[in-house]
Every structure is written in C-alpha cells, then in structure tokens.
Image: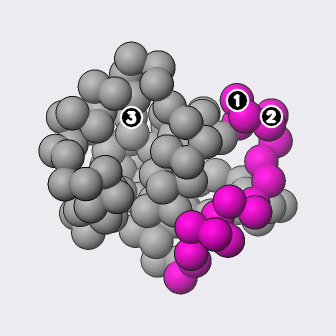
Amino acid sequence: MVNRHRGEIAAELGGETYTLCLTLGALAEIEHAYGGEDLIAIAERFESGRIKASDAIKVIGAGLRGGGLIISDDDVAKLSVGGGAAGYLRIVADLLKATFTND
C-alpha cells in the first residue's frame, strides 16, 4: 500500500503494479539527468507542457528506483501502460504532484 504522505504513488506498468517515489536520491538523479539543472527549472519546464517521452522515462525510472525497484531506463522504456502516451504523462503528473504538494 502506498503512503501519499511520503510522496508514493501506485502505477501499473507492463501489467504489474509498482510503488513509485521520488526520494532525495531519485530527485538528485533527475537533476543529474538534466545536466545539473535545479528542480525548480525542471518543474517549470514540465508545467509548461514541454514533456518528451525521454522525460517520462527518466522521471518514471527515478520513481521506480526510489520505490525500491532495480531497473534501468532502457527497461523502463519497454514497459507499457494503459492509455498510451496519456497514461505515461498521467504517471509523471501524479508522481510530481505527490512529491511536491500536500494533497
């Protein structure tokens, strides 16, 4: 069971349900993936609607690893979700919301 107070979400990927969490280490991983760009700049980019498939792979991968799964971004890229591209974006949005808000 996920703990929203810890920023966790549940998401179905590749027919399995996983817990995703952007831990401090996962957030640092995302910063590193964007050349050391700070989290505010990254969040502003995503809020503007400029999210690429590679962004979704990075964020979902970091969330899966933050949730305890050992998985590469190459393997994340192979996971399917219901709803196609919108499904991936929903997972990213849910994960970011759980990480950065008190909802």
Residue that extends furthest to the bottom in the rendered view of this protein: 70
Q: CA distance from mark 2 to mark 1?
A: 6 Å
Query: Where, by quadrant of the figure, is residue 103 drawn?
Result: top left
* Vertical relation: 53 (above or below) 32: above
37 lies left or right of 99: left
Residue 51 falls within the magenta-colored stretch: no
Q: CA distance from mark 3 to mark 2?
A: 19 Å
| Identity of the residue drawn at 32% across and 44% down | 99
Q: Which residue is at the far top?
A: 48
**For mark 1, does the 10 Å Cα neighbourhood hold few (<14), some (14 to 19), or many (20 or more) residues?**
few
Instruction: Residue under label 2, please give it.
Output: 83
Q: Residue furthest front?
A: 35
Q: What amino acid type is highlighted by mark number 2?
A: Gly
Q: Nearer the viewer, mark 3 or mark 2?
A: 2
Q: Give the colour scheme shown.
A: one colour
Instruction: Specify the amino acid type for callout 1.
Output: Ala
Q: CA distance from mark 1 to mark 3?
A: 16 Å
Q: Counting residues from the N terminus, which is met first, the one under dot 1 or under dot 3?
A: 1
Question: Is 79 colored magenta in this rendering?
Answer: yes
Under tag 3, what secondary structure? helix
Between 19 and 92, the one lying in front of the other is: 92
Quadrant containing the N terminus is bottom right
Q: Horizontally, is 38 left or right of 5 in the view? A: left
Highlighted range, magenta: 70-87
Residue at 79% over, 53% down: 80
What residue sits right under mark 1 in the picture?
Answer: 86
Q: Which mark is residue 97?
A: 3
- Which SS class for mark 1? helix
What element does badge 2 sit on? loop
Please provide percent x and percent y for residue 101: 28, 33
